[in-house]
Amino acid sequence: MDLFSLQGEPGARSAKSENSEPAVMSLRDALRVVRHPLYLVQRGGELVPQLGGAGSVASCVGYAPACLPENLGDPSFCREIGIRYPYLGGSMAKGISSAAMAEELGRAGMLGFFGAAGLPIATVSDTADRLKQSLGDIPYGFNLIHSPHEPELEKELAELYIRKGVRIIEASAFLALTLPLVRYRLHGIKRAADGSIVTPNRIIAKVSREELAAKFFAPAPEKLLRALVENGSITAEQAELAAHVPLAQDVTAEADSGGHTDNRPAMALFPTINSLAARLERQYGYDCKLRVGLGGGVSTPASAAAAFAMGAAYVMTGSVNQACVESGTSDTVRGMLAGTRQADVTMAPAADMFEMGVTVQVLKRGTMFPMRAAKLYDLYRAYGSMDEIPAAEREKLEKTMFLAPLEEIWRGTRDYFLKRDPSQVERSERDPKHKMALVFRWYLGMGAHWAKDGVENRKMDYQVWCGPAMGAFNEWAAGSFLDAAAERKIVTVALNILHGAAHLTRANFLRSQGIELRLEEIAPQPLEIAQIKEYLC
């Protein structure tokens, strides 16, 4: 047989045997070398993996093509964004998705979003300056979260992104389209010399519902376009151009994730939104392609391979990134996340949409936050003001959760909103129930700050956004160098997920030819980044 030598290939047991037969390589090692096609050939009554050449057609019983990680998703997505790999680091609020994460992912050929939600405008502005200077032309993004109770904040952030030249935002938790969101997308829209429509600003929308995906895939609503023309944000000609482009060309189908989530199963959600994208692309007659990525539950090679097999243009990770050393959270939280299992998460009231009954997915292992937050929402529903709360119940709140009298908490909360959004204080003076909501939201918001800052005496009150994907990653990494929180670097984790997905895609190609494979023969294992680069280069 005209077999290629495996000399010099990573994982080869030896270069050649004494009789000059090709070196023997395990199937797992052969699957790892994703840059070369793989053949299974009959040799001495056994199936032997071989890289590069098929040899005798009669002896070849299985074939898996080369499968580089950059080819797993939609190539047009990577090309238009300007990245190598179809991999996005999603935004986690309060800077947990940090500038350092965006920098590391960007330099590795991926796209990272800075988690701007819940941070002061000055901090977001400084971070925009930092990333522009440190990354230059390398793509990066910022988060714009829907703020129904603080519309001026949402407007201020959108205007900041326009001023700072932030070209990509991740729009998350939107329940409806807003004027600031449309204003950002359409800023600078024009017709190029070749007649095509140029939109400098890109929105990647994160949604869990079909009806919301449809709104983002559609052109901006006429009502909002008229408002933008009237206030001078765009011209009538730009409004006409806007009718021919989607508000978001790319939508992330967000399945069961940490933070804001509808706990949707990925296997049902993604195909539905992907089918919707194809239908709306035809309906609107766009010149561009509508694309769908998948986030929520993606944290292992198997979950990423499944996403790409369903047709995902890209994958987006979240919970697993929070456990990485570059994240903006505390070492205490990173340690808690490293010990998380899939059942260690639950839903709790959301600070930003508390009055609406919206919930977020958080860690329950090692913290009492979910139970205490749920108690506050029950009290909010039951009473019209803090004064109506029974004395014994109020005393319990002050001693166990707030560690101060509620009126003292209110004074601090009032001072905060007088600077951030005075309308909230004005409303609270008219509506005692709203005053109660703001005080309760203080606890919910501080739970995230205590966790991020690692405040030791508040560990039982930590709010840690986390989905079951964290437990899946920990199970996969168990016993490897990635078991330790200190070893989890954002690019190492990302390349393991991508390379492992390519590895499994090749294995599944063999399976589709009727070849029986045992999991212990093919399962990807965590690899040091230097090893992965050898397999890729």
Image (spheres, rainbow, N blue to C red):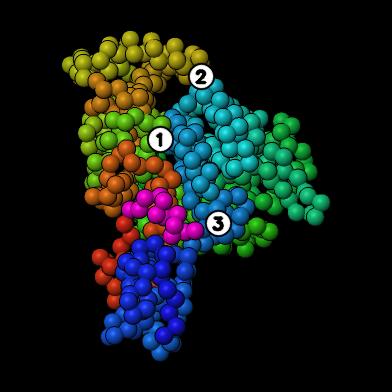
* Image marks 3 and 2: residues in contact by CB distance under 8 Å: no
Q: Which mark is residue 531?
A: none
Q: Which span is picked out in magenta?
A: 526-537
Q: Disc 1 marks which amino acid?
A: Ser
Expressed as whole percent of the image width and height from the top left, the position of residue 330 reads 34, 29
Check the image and report above or below for 122 versus 177.
above
Check the image and report above or below for 489 versus 161.
below
Q: Residue furthest right?
A: 193
Q: Is residue 239 left or right of residue 440?
A: right
**Distance between the alpha carbons at the discs numbered 2 and 1:** 29 Å
Q: Residue furthest bottom?
A: 58
Instruction: Please give the name of the residue rendered at 44% of the width and 36% of the height, measured from the top-left corner.
Output: 97
**Distance between the alpha carbons at the discs numbered 3 and 2:** 37 Å
Q: Is residue 534 magenta?
A: yes
Expressed as whole percent of the image width and height from the top left, the position of residue 213 reads 52, 51
Instruction: Please give the name of the residue rendered at 34% of the width and 68% of the height, measured from the top-left corner.
Output: 14
Q: Which residue is mark 1?
A: 327
Q: Disc 2 marks which amino acid?
A: Asp
Q: Residue furthest left?
A: 392
Q: Disc 3 marks which amino acid?
A: Arg
Instruction: Please give the name of the residue rendered at 43% of the width and 17% of the height, measured from the top-left corner.
Output: 428
Expressed as whole percent of the image width and height from the top left, the position of residue 79 reads 61, 55
Q: Is any atom of residue 511 visible in this view?
A: no
- Give the foreground label among 1 and 3: 1
The 10 Å Cα crowd at callout 1, few under 14, some 14 to 19, many 20 or more, is: many
Q: Which mark is residue 291?
A: 3
Q: Which residue is mark 2?
A: 421
- Give the foreground label among 3 and 2: 3
Majority SS type along the magenta span: helix
In this view of the protein, which residue sits in the foreground, 378 or 8?
8
If you read the primary sequence from the N terminus, does the residue marked by circle 3 or circle 2 appear first?
3
